[in-house]
């Protein structure tokens, strides 16, 4: 049964204060809630009964109103609710529940990870702890008391400040926490365990000293320095970029191993998947360092964009997530390289979010309905949501955007609001009309722009015609034109930026406002026939079609002042060649042995002035996943063969260049995850990848030596990944060595699981099955499940085997996980849900697995994804 945005009603009751007591024990936990409640005068039902949310996994011990216990005739208990028939206008509700965290395999609510207790309440986990108004527009002041055996649980944490510590008569420890800021229940957190801690201090700009504390299991405390630094950088950045200061005296972060998502922004007590927090040079790759920094920042930034100002309902999820992703992207961009960051983010968006928009689960950034909200923590809500905020930033300019953000935080502090409220603040601060722009929130699908141009030599006028269309998506047949900012520059045929007059402005770059279905833009006083540089910095999340010649793309690739478009021109060239090769493979033709990319790549490799990170990105061919997204009918093997072929053509043509770039970037340094070093390693390892593919035996020697002797995981892992991708003979023995070396480092073992599972291998499925019964595997741990099943889903030969065995294997695992951990099971469905886009033999096999899953007794999570995929 679906829930609709249009049915939103204000809550009938409010909870001013929430007092919780947890008696923690291995066999069961007793939770006592005292809720200070009153009727909501804004509700239009002033005689409503009290309906509290609560899951079946709780046992209700007792319930009382103003200390008078209720009899069973006074209430009704269903699988999802506790309904109390009559209540006064103001009262204290006391409710005692018993839960069993040790049996909580769903990892929502209160559960156990290793030897600790921890929580995950977003979106609707709190209702598995106690009966409550578990919705984000009910905000309350929380006081939490934890009672436990201090020998087992010396650390007992909840939100806010520790206000009291004592003992029970039987010798258990009692700790009370108080959070002065009212918040919805999804921001509640509790942690208890035998944890190690690292302390630090941050001095805020107004001079307050905030205690920073990161907790981990004892053996991991040596891996938190980087996260601590990232946290301090984030706190400083939010003060400077948004004027946002931290508001409590203590900020705590805890790493847990078993976690469904990346991390969670609970007030004053962030909880992280340990894979998104722990780092050391020996065990962590550069990519992971950057990810950790971004996620630490993301969760910290939620303190304002999410916690102080929260969402009215879950349809508004992007209000906090889209804005916070935009904030963390800008932060990372400020810490490192703006262009590199933008290329990485756009690559990800175009590969994964565009695919979501083109699939059966396509939904607007603000969905109109859902069955299970956990299914809507999506790339659309997060990444496309961030693009919407970025477009507002582009339309308003930095100054007005900041004014808008200030107004938003000031106007809505302590409130639960909507995406419309956010846009209104931006409009009020800037005076810019965003009424048409708002369609971005409600309309699903990726807009496609088709552009054509004309140049008049005599009048020096350049004319650009732009048409926009958006394909229908499930449940949305007709699409309206969107307000799309197009950042544009003009480049002369000898590579100079040309000024032009547009809208009375004479500039090198303009922001065009596309509003109609078809619009003609005219640029005057253009000296010579230009090549347009369209959608600079990827100024809108759209697809662009313009008939560039190969020469024009090569020109943009070498001369565009916009780094993003330089990269994109290279990608467009590569896509063209790869598409031609894919067709040749499909038609069993001989594959062409030359590439226009070679000359461009050669120039890049010889140019020592360029940022090595950008060179590495430009040299990286579009991924299997991105090419799949572009194909009308996906033939995974043909894409794989085409990519492999082009890689080898380039590798052979530039063997000497790759070999010398490799050597030039291998000097000894003490490892640091800073931009300059990361860039060099990226280029070095990209060069190694090609060099190995050239077939040069020296390259294999270099790879083996790098694998054996690197002092950091980035280089060691790169060597291993290249061995696996290039499928060299030694790959299996290297994998075995790697496991033996790292078997005590769980996070490194996960990398090993992924690589082992995605290896293109005729015996693949057998090996995947071995991995799932390997001592290093643990079905309770979502990271390990994602490593193996996610890895396998990426392989062409194992997953897309035409005997259907890969799909069947994944479906079996989904059926098993559906009962244990529905959120995880639902995520694992994604590769199968894209069935309609595959060539018919594969498509039919995927569909029959979806139908087989559908016959099971399904969780809401899996049910929604499977039914929508079969309908959509
Ligand atoms: N709010 C968290 C974040 O993005 C993610 C929580 C996801 N929870 C879930 N049930 N899907 O920072
Ligand atoms: Zn978030």
Image (cartoon, helix red, strand yellow):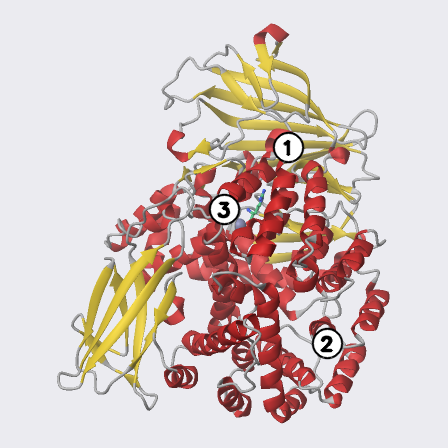
**Position of residue 582 measured from the top left corner of the image (x, y, whole percent):** 54, 72
**Position of residue 271 measured from the top left corner of the image (x, y, whole percent):** 64, 47
For the question of whether residue 23 can be seen, the reply is: yes
Marks 1 and 2 sit apart, C-alpha to C-alpha, by 49 Å
Q: Which residue is mark 2?
A: 719
Placement of 332 over or under 201, stated as above or below? below
Q: Which residue is mark 3?
A: 361
Q: Residues within 10 Å of mark 2 (few under 14, many from 20)?
A: many
**Is 31 positioned to the left or the right of 866 in the image?**
right
Q: Residues within 10 Å of mark 3 (few under 14, many from 20)?
A: many
Q: Earlier in the sequence, mark 2 or mark 3?
A: 3
Q: Which residue is mark 1?
A: 144
Q: Residues within 10 Å of mark 1 (few under 14, many from 20)?
A: many
In which quadrant of the rendered view does residue 97 lie? top right
Q: Which mark is residue 205?
A: none
- Label 3 CB-ligand 1 distance < 8 A: no
Disc 1, SS: strand
Marks 2 and 3 sit apart, C-alpha to C-alpha, by 37 Å
Measuring 67% from the left and 31% from the top, which residue is drawn there?
A: 145
Q: How many marks?
A: 3
Disc 2, SS: helix
Q: Earlier in the sequence, mark 3 or mark 1?
A: 1
**Position of residue 391 measured from the top left corner of the image (x, y, whole percent):** 36, 59
In which quadrant of the rendered view does residue 744 lie? bottom right
Q: Nearer the viewer, residue 507 or 63?
A: 507
**Is 423 positioned to the left or the right of 638 in the image?**
left
Q: Nearer the viewer, residue 77 or 119?
A: 77
Marks 3 and 1 sit apart, C-alpha to C-alpha, by 39 Å
For the question of whether residue 255 can be seen, the reply is: no
């Amino acid at each position: 049964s679906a829930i609709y945005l249009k049915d939103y009603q204000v809550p009938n009751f409010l909870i001013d204060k929430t007092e919780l007591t947890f008696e923690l024990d291995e066999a069961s936990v007793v939770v006592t809630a005292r809720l200070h409640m009153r009727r909501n005068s804004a509700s239009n039902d002033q005689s409503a009964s009290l309906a509290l949310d609560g899951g079946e996994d709780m046992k209700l011990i007792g319930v009382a109103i103003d200390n008078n216990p209720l009899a069973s005739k006074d209430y009704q208990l269903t699988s999802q609710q506790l309904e109390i028939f009559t209540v006064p206008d103001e009262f204290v509700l006391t409710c005692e529940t018993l839960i069993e965290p040790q049996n909580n395999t769903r990892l929502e609510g209160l559960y156990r990870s290793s030897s600790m207790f921890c929580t995950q309440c977003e979106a609707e986990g709190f209702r598995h702890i106690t009966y409550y108004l578990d919705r984000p527009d009910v905000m309350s002041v929380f006081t939490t008391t934890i009672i436990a055996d201090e020998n087992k649980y010396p650390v007992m944490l909840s939100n806010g400040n520790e206000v009291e510590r004592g003992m029970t008569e039987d010798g258990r420890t009692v700790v009370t926490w108080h959070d002065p800021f009212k918040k919805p229940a999804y921001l509640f957190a509790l942690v208890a365990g035998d944890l190690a801690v690292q302390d630090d201090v941050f001095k805020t700009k107004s001079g307050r000293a905030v205690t920073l504390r990161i907790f981990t299991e004892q053996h991991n405390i040596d891996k938190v320095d980087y996260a601590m630094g990232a946290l301090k950088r984030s706190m400083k950045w939010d003060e400077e970029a948004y004027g946002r200061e931290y508001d409590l005296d203590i900020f705590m972060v805890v790493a847990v191993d078993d976690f469904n998502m990346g991390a969670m922004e609970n007030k004053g007590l962030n909880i992280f998947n340990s894979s998104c927090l722990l780092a050391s040079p020996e065990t962590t790759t550069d990519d992971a360092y950057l990810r950790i920094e971004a996620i630490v920042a993301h969760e910290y930034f939620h303190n304002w964009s999410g916690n102080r100002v929260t969402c009215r309902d879950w349809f508004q999820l992007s209000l906090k997530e889209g804005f916070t992703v935009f904030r963390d992207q800008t932060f990372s961009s400020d810490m490192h390289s703006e262009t590199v960051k933008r290329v990485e983010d756009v690559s990800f968006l175009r590969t994964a979010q565009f695919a979501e928009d083109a699939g059966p689960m396509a939904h607007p950034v603000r969905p109109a309905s859902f069955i299970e909200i956990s299914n809507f923590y999506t790339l659309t809500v997060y990444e496309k949501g961030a693009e919407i905020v970025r477009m507002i930033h582009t339309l308003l300019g930095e100054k007005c955007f900041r004014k808008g953000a200030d107004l938003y935080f000031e106007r809505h502090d302590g409130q639960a609001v909507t995406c419309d409220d956010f846009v209104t603040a931006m409009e009020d601060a800037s005076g810019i009309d965003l009424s048409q722009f708002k369609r971005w929130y409600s309309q699903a699908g990726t807009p496609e722009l088709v552009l054509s141009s004309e140049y008049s030599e005599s009048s020096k006028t350049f004319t650009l015609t732009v048409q926009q269309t958006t394909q229908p998506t499930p449940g949305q047949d007709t699409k309206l034109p969107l307000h799309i900012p197009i950042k544009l520059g003009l480049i002369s045929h000898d590579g100079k930026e040309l000024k032009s007059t547009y809208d009375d402005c004479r500039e090198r770059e303009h922001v065009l406002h596309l509003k109609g279905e078809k619009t003609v833009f005219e640029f005057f006083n253009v000296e010579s026939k230009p090549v347009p540089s369209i959608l600079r910095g990827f100024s809108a999340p759209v697809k662009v079609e313009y008939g560039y010649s190969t020469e024009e793309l090569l020109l943009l690739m070498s001369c565009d002042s916009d780094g993003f478009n330089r990269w994109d021109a290279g990608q467009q060239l590569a896509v063209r060649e790869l598409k031609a090769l894919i067709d040749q493979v499909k038609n069993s033709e001989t594959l062409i042995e030359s590439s226009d990319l070679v000359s461009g790549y050669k120039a890049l490799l010889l140019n020592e002035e360029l940022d090595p990170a950008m060179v590495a990105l430009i040299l990286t061919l579009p991924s299997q996943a991105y090419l799949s997204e572009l194909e009308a009918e996906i033939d995974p093997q043909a894409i794989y063969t085409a990519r492999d072929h082009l890689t080898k053509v380039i590798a052979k043509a530039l063997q000497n260049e790759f070999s010398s770039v490799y050597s030039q970037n291998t000097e000894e340094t003490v490892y640091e995850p800073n931009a300059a070093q990361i860039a060099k390693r990226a280029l070095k390892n990209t060069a190694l990848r090609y060099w190995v593919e050239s077939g040069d035996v020296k390259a294999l020697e270099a790879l083996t030596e790098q694998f054996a002797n690197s002092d950091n995981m980035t280089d060691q892992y790169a060597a291993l990944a290249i061995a696996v991708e290039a499928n060299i003979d030694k790959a299996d023995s290297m994998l075995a060595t790697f496991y033996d070396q790292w078997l005590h480092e769980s996070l490194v073992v996960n990398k090993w699981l992924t690589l082992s599972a995605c290896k293109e291998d005729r015996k693949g499925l057998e090996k995947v099955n071995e991995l799932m019964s390997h001592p290093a595997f643990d079905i309770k741990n979502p990271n390990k499940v994602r490593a193996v099943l996610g890895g396998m889903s990426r392989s062409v030969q194992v997953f897309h085997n035409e005997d259907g065995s890969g799909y069947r294997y994944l479906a079996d695992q989904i059926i098993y996980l559906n009962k244990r951990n529905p959120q995880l099971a639902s995520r694992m469905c994604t590769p199968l849900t894209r069935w309609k886009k595959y060539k018919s033999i594969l498509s039919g096999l995927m569909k029959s697995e979806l139908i087989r899953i559908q016959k099971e007794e399904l969780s809401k999570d899996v049910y929604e994804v499977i039914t929508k995929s079969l309908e959509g």
